[in-house]
Image (cartoon, grey):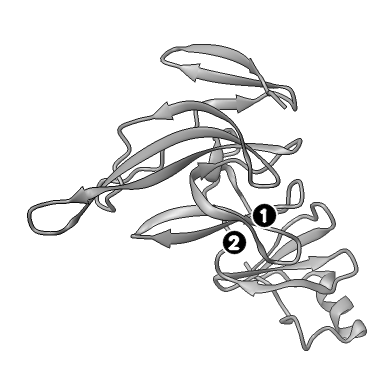
Amino acid sequence: MKIKSTLAAFFVLSGLMAQLPETFDKVAPFNEGMAAVQKGDEWAFINDSGALAIDFRKDVHWNMQAKKHSNGIHAIEYPHFSDGLCMVMTYVEDIPLYGFINPKGELAIEHQFLNVNPFKDGYTIGIVYEKVLRGQNEFKLNIYEYKFHEVLMDTSGDIVKFLRRRYNIQMRKDRYKVPMINSKLLNNQLIAVKTDNEWQIQKIDL
């Protein structure tokens, strides 16, 4: 259902209609001073005075069928900033990869995650991959090896801790499934890491 909020009237009075459409398909709650607004398949961000802060774009990540008790990308109901970063998505070789933009709309953390949580208390947990060239076969075709790691990353984009190696992830479109994140950020000092059917509590080493 189209949302005709009081924002539209505000935009008319303040002369912002040249920047924003009259109506939106969705208006998300404010978070860290900005709210996401959707028109068609694009999202933009407005600031708390109603001005356009980030122009309409297609790459911000959200999930129409978000599950609040899920983890990672499946839990993102609408685009939002957390710790000054918002999740964005692109495709590399038909596989969705996730990164983060800053409040200026600039890419702050490269698209490198197969699954990732929003930042909280300065950190996020996600699954990154490496594509390593191992040589060529008899037909002169490149042979690659993929390595997968569940990691703890800070808002600077630095990997603070390798939590565990991940296996059995297929990087072909017809076989690919988003890998689940098996670790939990408890606070800014502790992480719960699941191995097999057991949990280990680890400290964040600074």
Q: Which residue is pictured at 40% across the width and 37% down the height? A: 148
Left or right, 51 with respect to 81, comes to right
| Spot occupied by residue 77 in the image (x, y as percentages of width and height) | 61, 50
Tell me the number on the disc at residue 86. Answer: 1
Q: Which residue is pictured at 60% across the width and 72% down the height? A: 57
| Spot occupied by residue 103 in the image (x, y as percentages of width and height) | 76, 61
Residue 29 is at least partly visible in this image: yes
In the rendered image of this protein, does residue 200 appear above or below residue 58? above
Left or right, 176 with respect to 102, comes to left
What amino acid is found at the position of numbered circle 1 in the picture? Cys
Quadrant in the rendering for residue 142: bottom left
Residue 62 is at least partly visible in this image: no
Mark closest to the chain's N terminus, 1 or 2: 2
Q: 170 or 42: which is nearer to us?
A: 170
Left or right, 204 with respect to 139, comes to right
In the rendered image of this protein, does residue 35 appear above or below residue 69? below
In the rendered image of this protein, does residue 27 appear above or below residue 186? below
For label 2, the SS is loop
What amino acid is found at the position of numbered circle 2 in the picture? Val
Residue that carries the numbered disc 2 in the rendered image: 60
Q: 148 or 98: which is nearer to us?
A: 148
- In the rendered picture of this protein, how many numbered marks are placed on residues? 2
Do labels 1 and 2 touch, CB within 8 Å?
yes
Q: Quadrant of the C terminus?
A: top right
Q: Which residue is pictured at 55% across the width and 65% down the height? A: 59
In the rendered image of this protein, does residue 125 appear above or below residue 196? below
Q: Which residue is pictured at 83% across the width and 71% down the height? A: 7
| Spot occupied by residue 181 in the image (x, y as percentages of width and height) | 50, 32
Q: 105 or 77: which is nearer to us?
A: 105
Query: How many angstroms separate mark 1 from mark 2 (CA)?
Result: 8 Å
